[in-house]
Image (cartoon, helix red, strand yellow):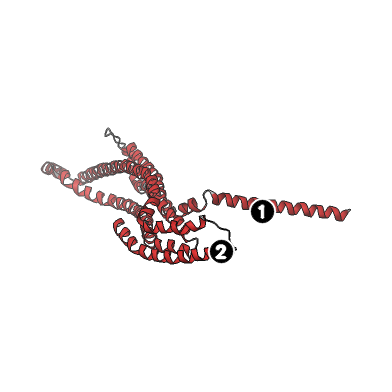
Amino acid sequence: MDTSISAEASKVSFLGRLIGGIGATFYLSYMGWQMQSGDREWEITPMLKPFFIGLILLHWTSFYSFVQSPFRVVSTPSQTMFEKIEREANTLRVKRFQKQNQLLDYMIKKEAEEKAKQKELDNLKEKGFIDKITDSIKEGWDKIQTPVEEWFIRMDFKFQRWGADLLEAIGLSILRVCTYLIFFIQKIWSYILIVLGPIAIGMALIPGFESSLTSWVSKFININLYTFVAFTIINIGQQLIISAYTMEIDRYELMINSAGNVDSATISAFINGNGMLHVTLFTVVAYIVTGIGVLMTPTIADSIVSAGGAGVMTKMKQSAGKYVAGAQGLYKLGKGEDKDKK
């Protein structure tokens, strides 16, 4: 992808150089005419602008790579942290899955055994003396009946498990769609800005398009901030997801601990109260919150570029100027009223 972008950018850079050359001719001619006629003082600095833009267009690939390099360096720690947190989350995810299966297997076997014994007792109550004697021939009946009962209970628990898995799949799909969408948008914008950038920069020398260079640079910086911002949000969201996994595992530990000790009453209450669905909601909420946070990446990147540094100070100065002007107006109004009273 990056190789194709560089190739396309190199092709379009010729058009940018042509536009820049025409713009430089008009720019220098207009400026030279103003200096000769006396409308403008003799200056050297403004005349360096065409040469500066020409150097950018001649070394376009190196220029945009130079602009990208600081943001790649900044985003590297976030990506490294993401890989570390992802490994931790995967470990907890496997442990959580094992605990779920351990819980379900125990509950299924326990319920199947209890139902098989209850049916056998009911049958014994209805049997006569002769029937009880023939029970010695049916010693393996419970071994046959228990798997049948186990199958029905497994199907009952399967519905609850399927519901929990469906909720989790929806939440995880939302998170993945949001994440892929942001990086997809970043790739599209990067491709457009890099390929068509020489044209925008070449037009910076044409009257009326003087700000196209600064506009391109600010937009390109904004797009390259997406990687750092998105990975930072994902890392924070991963902490929420890990907390949800840990909370769910802790609840399973209360029912079946690492030593294999089982709390049957807690397990029965958990399953009968659709506990698996309720516990899964913690993870689903963490997925959705992280996805919403990832969608805020463009907004956060815009605030960093447009509201940082001088932009904030300019707004503060404008606000302060309005307050000062208002205070002066009130002061003059007060003095006018005092004169009228006199």
Q: Quadrant of residue 189?
A: bottom left
Q: Amino acid at mark 1?
A: Lys
Residue at coordinates 81% horizontally, 52% vertically from top-left? 335
Residue 148 locus on image (x, y percent): 19, 49
Q: Is residue 142 visible?
A: yes
Evaluate if marks 1 and 2 touch, with contact meaning CB atoms under 8 Å apart. no
Whole-number angstrom distance, CA of label 1 to CA of label 2: 42 Å
Q: Quick check: 185 above or below 271?
A: below
Residue 269 appears in the picture as rendered: no
Q: Give how far across and how far down residue 27 sits, in percent.
A: 49, 64
| Of residues 337 and 209, the one drawn nearer to the viewer in this rendering | 209
Q: Nearer the viewer, mark 1 or mark 2?
A: 2
- In the rendered image, residue 157, in percent from the top left (x then y), is placed at 28, 49
Q: Quadrant of the N terminus?
A: bottom left
Closer-to-camera residue (8/150): 8
* Three-letter amino acid code at the position of disc 2: Gln
Q: Residue furthest left?
A: 137
Residue position for label 2: 36
In this view, the residue in front, 91 or 113, is 91
| Sequence-wise first label, 1 or 2 | 2
Q: Is residue 288 left or right of residue 155?
A: right
Give the secondary structure at mark 2: helix
Mark 1: few/some/many CA within 10 Å (<14, 14-19, 20+): few
Residue at (42, 66) in percent of width and height:
19
Q: Is residue 109 above or below residue 294?
A: above
Question: Residue sitting at 22 percent across and 47 percent down?
Answer: 150
Q: Which residue was labeled with disc 1? A: 322
